[in-house]
Image: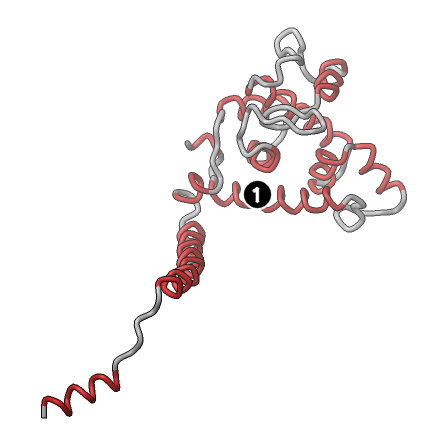
Amino acid sequence: MAGRRGSAHAHMRQPVPRRGERLLRWYRVVPAVLLVLTLAVVVVVGSNPTSLGRYLVYPVHHEEAIEAASERHYVDPLLVCAIIKCESDWDENARSAAGAIGLMQVMPLTAETMAALGYVDADVWDPDALTDPEVNIEYGCAYLGYLQSHLSSLDEVIAAYNAGIGAVQGWIAEGGTIPDDVEFAETRVYLDRVRNAYEGYQGSYPDGIGEL
């Protein structure tokens, strides 16, 4: 009996995977685990956007400066937050290859123009200090306010923040509409990103960023 039982077990025994095969199986499992974890986070954030979502996906820093500058220039603080997230991801030291600086990626020429037009008091907010978060936010909000006063829709304002007001006004003058006739691929992607971020901030801060 012992011999026969041993023979049966030997017939059922599975080969032991080699080390390489075990590693390959593990590497196949890891992406699936990460996907499950990502989906879990998305579900949690989506079900409770005003708590976990605001810290993981839609953070806010410098809220006092954002609220004050937004009030001065009649712009929505949540739109400012969306712009900052998409422009620099809240990195106050960010610099672009084109020369844009800081949280809202303000171009030095744009800051000088806002000061020259009287939108910002350069004696209070030095246009050469764009690495200072409060200064950067002031000029970024001033520029948003300027765009709002010259354009007629949110999509136009967002597109102009990326492509420049001249480009947007040119597309409109040719009979185009925004976003349908945005000619720059980068601006089309940017517009979608900012609109999505704006909606995320609206959902995460239904009472405004002052509730922090």
The color scheme shown is secondary structure
Residue with the most extreme top position: 123
> Along the horizontal axis of the image, is 205 left or right of 95?
left
**Image quadrant in which you'd find residue 55:** top left
**Residue 104 coordinates in the image, percent (x, y):** 62, 28
**Image quadrant in which you'd find residue 25:** bottom left
Residue with the most extreme left position: 1
Q: Which residue is more in the foreground, 6 or 150?
A: 6
Residue with the most extreme front position: 3
Which residue is pictured at 77% across the width and 32% down the height? 164
> Along the horizontal axis of the image, is 50 left or right of 128?
left
Amino acid on which disc 1 is placed: Ala
- Is the residue 35 above or below the residue 112 in the image? below
**Residue 34 coordinates in the image, percent (x, y):** 42, 55
Numbered disc total:
1
* Element type where label 1 sits in the image: helix
Binning the other alpha carbons within 10 Å of mark 1 as few (below 14), some (14 to 19) or many (20 upward) gives many
Which residue is pictured at 80% across the width and 48% down the height? 181
Q: Which residue is more in the foreground, 140 or 8?
A: 8
Which residue is pictured at 71% across the width and 32% down the height? 148
**Residue 134 coordinates in the image, percent (x, y):** 55, 19
> Along the horizontal axis of the image, is 118 left or right of 61?
right
Which residue is pictured at 42% across the width and 32% down the height? 211
Residue linked to disc 1: 197
- Is the residue 96 above or below the residue 9 in the image? above
**Residue 73 coordinates in the image, percent (x, y):** 64, 24
Q: Which residue is more in the foreground, 61 or 118?
A: 61
